[in-house]
Amino acid sequence: MFFICSIAACLPVNATMHQAHYDVTIIGGGAAGLTLALHLAGNARVAVITKGPLTEGATYYAQGGISAVIDESDSIDSHIEDTLKAGAGLCDEEVVHYTVSQGKSAIKWLIDCGVPFTRQTQADGTTALHLTREGGHSHRRVIHAADSTGRAVETTLVGQVKQHPNIDILEHHIAIDLITGNKLGLDNNQCFGCYVLDRNTDQVITIASRFTVLATGGAGKVYLYTSNPDVSTGDGIAMGWRAGCRVANMEFIQFHPTCLYHPQAKSFLITEAVRGEGGHLLLPNGRRFMEKYHPQRELAPRDIVARAIDHEMKKGGLDCVYLDISHQPADFILSHFPNVYRTCLEYGIDITKEAIPVVPAAHYTCGGIHADLKGRTDLAGLYAIGETAHTGLHGANRMASNSLLECLVFAKAAAHDISLQLQTATELPPLPAWDESRVTDSEEEIVIAHDWDELRRVMWDYVGIVRTDKRLQRALNRIKLLAAEADEHYANYKVSNDLLELRNLITVAELIVRSALSRKESRGLHYTLDYPDTLPGTGENTVLSPDPH
């Protein structure tokens, strides 16, 4: 096997070395990025770049689980049908079939890695994986580790990655931009690596890499209220777009119906499984309301549940609605939802005795960088996997617990494709160091803080669960002004983490609004009062292409 880097060049980056070379650079350390790293590390030198600690990402906070056909009463066809139904006509059936058919092997791989999934004792005394049910699923097919599945998966994969000698972990580093042939003035416009800001030293590192993978997660922080962690700022989507990649279906932002509503709680999600195990959504007077919106009531797809809650809150002038699981035995609640119970109790809410105040919040970005079944983007040498990518799996609405499944399946597929190409040596061109000779330290950080806050409020007020063209146009006008301010700041001052995240969020916000304005119907997660009906037929994807100039 030929590696493009020498042993010396692959040593971990330090303060005196501002260039590094790897076979594969993975930007993002969630389930997708770590799974890819582990599948590749046997025959490649890999770097994993994360903005914060390795565990700080959306995967770690995922509560529900991973959907896969395990039970004999379930079937691949049923999982496919449920996914297609939730996707409201925009799922790619080939992608859905491929992903669902890989579910059982993906779960087996995680078990082999050591993920401690919840098990139950059978009648014959043996144990089997415990399966729960979530919104949109017609069977119990969600494998979980109590109500902290993401934490169990992430910590297990982190342990594996840290032990592997072929994987370098660059924590507290944020990617600035991709290095492409166009930017270097070459005829061959492929991706050759990226520039990365070391947040520990404020130094910019040039990383040359034969393959670069965007696995940065979603963009929930573009909204004022979100279940996502602070790192979910759409970095991969924005970088891929600036490098010349198409994006698709950015108007479909999933709002999780049930996030804890409490003045001191920050983005705590109440897992879908609470409704899957019999939780009721209630108005303040104790009445259920979901039967008015869907025959599956609380188990309807997330877009319908979120829109129903939004409607009831606006109609009644409510601050929140309530999710009640207290009719179940206390032992049942404690064994199934220990994390939810523990966290709610910290805020004075005993879920074994009382209902949980909840509101919808931005949760998942269904669109992203256009990628094929192997994770390949429009740019040679660049891949996108996980929430950063648009593969066609989710269509107009992601079904619960299909996201971690997508991460696992596409990470493995991308690893296989990259491994085949690593067998042929390719020389990388010399890459220039980051040039900050014409910029200074910023003396106006308040501008970044102000623009960050304004952007998120604009998106929440005008580009939320229910939209109109007037609201969207108003948002777009303001986003363009914020973009001009951010570009001016980027051109004149040294880069910082906050500036880079703001720049990326502004890019993603504009993509969301432009995509929403182009869809003249309501479908899945995109609901507009101007076009409340769904157009006949299966519908078309919204695909945006960057200006080649």
Image (tube, rainbow, N blue to C red):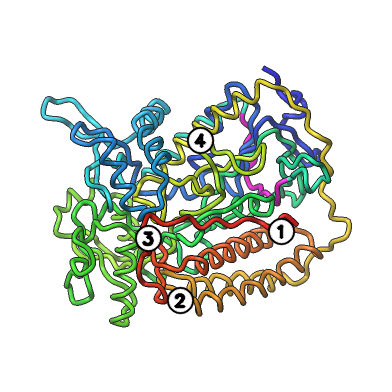
Marks 4 and 3 sit apart, C-alpha to C-alpha, by: 26 Å
Q: Amino acid at mark 2?
A: Thr
Residue at the spot of label 4: 411
- Crowd band around label 2 with a 10 angstrom C-alpha radius: few (<14), some (14–19), many (20+): some
Please tell me how crowded label 4 is: few (under 14), some (14-19), or many (20+) other residues with Cα within 10 Å: many
For the residues marked 2 and 1, what is the alpha-carbon distance in whole angstroms? Answer: 35 Å
Task: Rate crowding at label 3 as few (under 14), some (14 to 19) or many (20 or more) other CA atoms within 10 Å.
Answer: many
Mark 3 and mark 1 residues within 8 Å of each other at the beta carbon = no
Let me know if residue 325 appears in the view: no
**CB-based contact (under 8 Å), mark 2 and mark 4:** no
Query: Marks 3 and 1, how far apart in space?
Result: 37 Å
Query: Alpha carbon of mark 4 to alpha carbon of mark 1: how far?
Result: 30 Å
| Tag 1: amino acid | Ser
Residue highlighted by disc 1: 496
**Residue named by callout 3:** 524
As drawn, 65 above or below 282: above
Residue at mark 2 to residue at mark 4: CA–CA distance: 37 Å
Which is more toward the observer, 255 or 447? 255
- Locate residue 196, reporting x and y percent: 71, 47
Element under disc 1: loop
Q: Quadrant of the N terminus?
A: top right
